[in-house]
Amino acid sequence: MSGMINNFYSSGGHRRRRGGKSGKSGGNGGGKKDERLCFICKKPGHYKREGPQGGGGGAKKGAKKGLASLKAKLAAAEARRLEAVAALAVAEAEVARVVAEIAAKEAEEAEEEAEETAGGETTTKPAEGAAPGGTK
């Protein structure tokens, strides 16, 4: 019985048998929790690691996933750019149509004005009731 370890109640730091200790200080049961903090993120949960929890085994796979998501973002941005280019072309066509309409209207008005001035000089109608030779 001398080789048997039977101190599972007051084990101090290292738990040697089942049951017993949670916080490892004093009597049976939990003691003060470990208050050491992670030197990067200042959280108490993972002070032994060199970085925050997570990452680990699938880092290369995660990098590929990140590349795929960046390519998807690029494709979406390119689609938005093409949509904007198409909308710009439609707007430019509308502007060109309106400019042509304005030019046609101005040409029509100029033609009417030219007809009025040219017609007014050649044919002067005497006022109704007036003598053909004018008044003396």
Image (cartoon, rainbow, N blue to C red):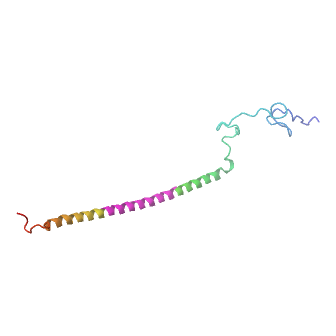
Q: Residue furthest left?
A: 136
Which residue shows up at 83% across the image and 35% down it?
Answer: 29
Name the residue at the front extreme.
129
Q: Is residue 102 left or right of residue 117?
A: right
- The residue at the point 69 percent across, 49 percent down is 57
Start-end of magenta stretch: 77-102
The picture quadrant where one finds residue 124 is bottom left
User: Magenta-highlighted stretch: main secondary structure?
Assistant: helix
Q: Position of residue 80 (x, y in %)?
A: 50, 57
Residue 116 lies, in percent from the top left, at 20, 65
In terms of depth relative to the viewer, which is nearer, 60 or 76?
76
Q: Position of residue 122 (x, y in %)?
A: 14, 67
Q: Where does residue 49 sit, x and y in percent of width and height?
A: 69, 40
Q: Nearest the camera: 78 or 100?
A: 100
Above or below, comparing residue 94 to residue 54 in the picture:
below
Locate residue 98 relative to residue 70 in the image: left or right: left
View extreme (right): residue: 1
Residue shown at 82% from the left, 32% from the top? 12
Quarter of the picture holding the C terminus: bottom left
